[in-house]
């Protein structure tokens, strides 16, 4: 009421990620753990209190507004809800051309129709669909329009914020195949935010597991999914349904709920829910330990591994 500061929330704390061109890094975790905040922080849509976002040698957080605007076309985002992210009062042609005009790729009033048709073809839509409004499309088609809008400014990195979670399963597969094909043809890099392990296994090259604002485990997909080291990652993977019932594994059930980021536990943030927690886990946050060629885990169970 009196506009006083009563506390601070570290939605993202000490996260360190690296994404190479032509590669997909999946960011996995429960709802509320800070995944979307990471993506929007990279895009500079949310101000960060510290840290750096280095893109092609430039720290985006240190750029002036004018300099940052010039780099906007290099990093784009695909939002979770394909309907809410599109202006319902604009035709598809204007939705795609708007970003091109704003970032100086092409003037929206004179954008060559051939270029717009080419972009629509890239995402599997017909050229005459550009005269329609978003409500005239299905959910999958609307997400293709959102992808086309991102592609229109020729980006190098796309933040995919759970782009398939609002779609039917069959449509999810089509969108994932499209994203994979676009990466192969255009050399795109993806930060793919998701909670679906099956999507990670299909699309990603590297994966980072996030819990309460921090990365607890990261590495190549084959390393992390085959030999998960952190108890939280093990619990996530144990909940994934298996087609082969003969390989049925025990489901690890976590006790309680994820703590509030406004009041995180002392020590390892996961220790109140971890069955393997010890006194050290309750007093100090674990440092990073290498358990494989590119496999890193923040857990006291591996703190003696060099």
Image: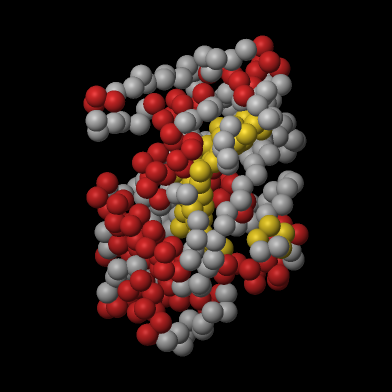
Horizontal placement of 136 versus 283: left or right?
A: left
Horizontal placement of 15 versus 164: left or right?
A: right
Residue 74 image-quadrant placement: bottom right
Q: Residue shown at 30%/62% (left/top)?
A: 141
In this orientation, which residue lies closer to the viewer: 169 or 248?
A: 248
Number of numbered discs overlaid on the protein picture: 0
Q: Residue shown at 66%/33% (left/top)?
A: 288
- Does residue 275 appear in this view? yes
In this orientation, which residue lies closer to the viewer: 105 or 268?
A: 268
Work out whether 169 lies above or below 186. above
- Does residue 1 appear in this view? no
Work out whether 116 lies above or below 269. below
Work out whether 287 lies above or below 114. above
Percent of width and height locating residue 240? 35, 31
Percent of width and height locating residue 50? 74, 46
* Residue furthest to the top: 279
Percent of width and height locating residue 106? 51, 82
Q: Residue shown at 59%/15% (left/top)?
A: 277
Work out whether 8 lies above or below 246. below
Residue 145 image-quadrant placement: bottom left
Horizontal placement of 66 versus 37: left or right?
A: right
The quadrant the N terminus occupies is: top right
Task: State the scheme by which the image is colored.
Answer: secondary structure
Q: Residue shown at 40%/50% (left/top)?
A: 203
Horizontal placement of 9 versus 150: left or right?
A: right
The quadrant the C terminus occupies is: top right
Percent of width and height locating residue 127? 29, 78
């Amino acid at each position: 009421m009196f506009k006083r500061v009563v506390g601070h929330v570290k939605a993202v704390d000490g996260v360190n990620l690296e994404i190479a061109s032509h590669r997909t890094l999946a960011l996995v975790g429960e709802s509320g753990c800070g995944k979307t905040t990471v993506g929007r922080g990279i895009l500079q849509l949310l101000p960060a209190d510290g840290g750096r976002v280095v893109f092609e040698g430039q720290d985006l957080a240190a750029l002036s507004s004018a300099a940052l605007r010039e780099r906007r076309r290099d990093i784009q985002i695909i939002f979770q809800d394909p309907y809410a992210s599109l202006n319902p009062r604009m035709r598809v042609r204007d939705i795609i051309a708007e970003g091109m005009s704003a970032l100086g790729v092409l003037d929206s009033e004179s954008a060559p129709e051939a270029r717009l048709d080419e972009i629509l073809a890239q995402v599997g839509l017909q050229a005459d669909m550009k005269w329609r409004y978003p409500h005239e499309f299905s959910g999958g088609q609307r997400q293709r329009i959102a992808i086309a809008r991102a592609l229109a400014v020729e980006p190098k990195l796309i933040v995919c914020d759970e782009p398939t979670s609002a779609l039917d399963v069959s449509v999810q597969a089509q969108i994932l195949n499209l994203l994979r094909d676009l990466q192969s043809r255009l050399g795109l890099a993806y930060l793919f935010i998701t909670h679906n392990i099956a999507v990670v296994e299909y699309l990603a090259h590297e994966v980072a597991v996030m819990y309460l604002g921090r990365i607890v485990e990261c590495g190549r997909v084959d390393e992390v999914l085959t030999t998960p080291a952190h108890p939280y990652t093990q619990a996530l993977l144990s909940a994934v349904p298996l087609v082969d019932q003969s390989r049925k594994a025990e489901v690890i059930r976590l006790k309680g709920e994820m703590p509030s980021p406004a009041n995180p536990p002392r020590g390892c943030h996961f220790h109140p829910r971890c069955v393997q927690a010890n006194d050290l886990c309750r007093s100090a946050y674990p440092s990073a330990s290498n358990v494989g060629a590119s496999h890193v885990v923040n857990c006291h169970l591996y703190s003696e591994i060099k």
